[in-house]
Amino acid sequence: MNLPRSLACLNGQSMPLEDVKIPALDRGFLFGDAVYEVLRLYRGKAWLLEEHWQRLGRSLQAIGIRGIDLEVTKRRLLDTIAAGGFQEALAYLQITRGVAPRSHRFPADTRPLEFLYVQDYTDAYSALRGDGASVITHPDLRWHRCDIKSTNLLGNVLAIQAAAEAGCVEALLYAADGTLTEATHSSFFAVIESTLVATPQGSAILPGITRGFLERLASRVGVPFREQHLKRHQLTEVSELFLSGTGAEVLPVVRVDGKPVGSGLVGPVSLRMWDAYRQAVAEFIR
Ligand SMILES: Cc1ncc(COP(=O)(O)O)c(C=O)c1O
């Protein structure tokens, strides 16, 4: 396997990623009893770091993992970035409930395990941005607390695999009644009569950090935004669609299930949001 250049840190100890050993009885491994974050670095600076840290704090609290000092964890992340001299990179951070004899209930007195690594990143989406991407729709098979960024990702994995097999980059997930929730590892925005529309926040979706940033950006650049549930069949009525996420940034979608979205071309609102996003990143690294 040819992996990008990386550096890891396990419970505060810096080491090559290949040397990280996670005990077999770690609850993250056995039960998915863990939460995580993925951050993007632009020119060595962690983008939207405070927002990611707040979400991480909420995730930890939601599943009752205690004993993590998030300021210490942040320092370890920043030290790892500096030690590796990373520029364009992704940072992955996972905190599990720790290692204990296998039993479903929370163990008493277990120290959480903290694993992070930073890895060089080349934008895999840039080639798609010009002409727009294709997605499929897929049943949302996940649990009822998708607002927690937990490492239980089987529903996401099965859906993105179906998308990949269909030659698509993402899957838009829909609930049993046809209501669209989000994508497997990105949020989505639709454009209806020049207004940006996204799924109302709640337990059915992850509060995307990029989405939150784009909402604030939309208000800055004068693009109206509202939350609204969209059903799968309503995708034929939207004029534009784009994905948002730490990796995807703003990625226009021009086909869903093989059918064109709106005109089938990347639309003006998507382009405007992508431009504004790029500009915000450029200001951040200036
Ligand atoms: C299910 C899901 N929704 C949305 C997102 C986008 O979130 P963010 O903008 O914080 O990367 C992700 C990111 O991995 C995700 O896994």
Image: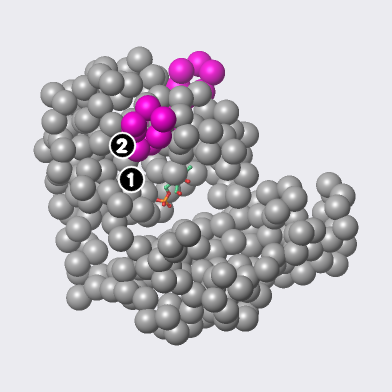
Is 13 on the left or on the right of 229, as rendered?
right
- Specify whether residue 66 is in view: no
Q: Residue at x 20, y 37 (%)?
A: 132
Which numbered disc covers residue 244? Answer: 1
- Specify whether residue 62 is in view: yes
Q: Is residue 210 above or below residue 196?
A: below
Horizontal and vertical percent position of residue 208: 42, 48
Q: Amino acid at mark 2?
A: Phe
Q: Nearer the viewer, mark 1 or mark 2?
A: 1
Secondary structure beneath dot 1 equals strand
Horizontal and vertical percent position of residue 51: 44, 61
Q: Is residue 212 above or below residue 195?
A: below
Q: Quadrant of the C terminus?
A: bottom left
Secondary structure beneath dot 2 equals strand
Q: For the magenta stretch, what is the residue range?
A: 164-182
Magenta region includes residue 173? yes
Q: Tell whether circle 1 marks a residue whose Cβ is less than 8 angstroms from ligand 1.
A: yes
Quarter assignment of residue 255: top left
Q: Residue at x 50, y 23 (%)?
A: 139
Disc 1 to disc 2, C-alpha distance: 7 Å
Horizontal and vertical percent position of residue 178: 46, 18
Q: Dot 2 corresponds to which residue?
A: 189
Q: Residue at x 60, y 49 (%)?
A: 150
Quarter assignment of residue 85: bottom left
Considering only order in the chain, which callout, 2 or 1, is on the residue closer to the N terminus? 2
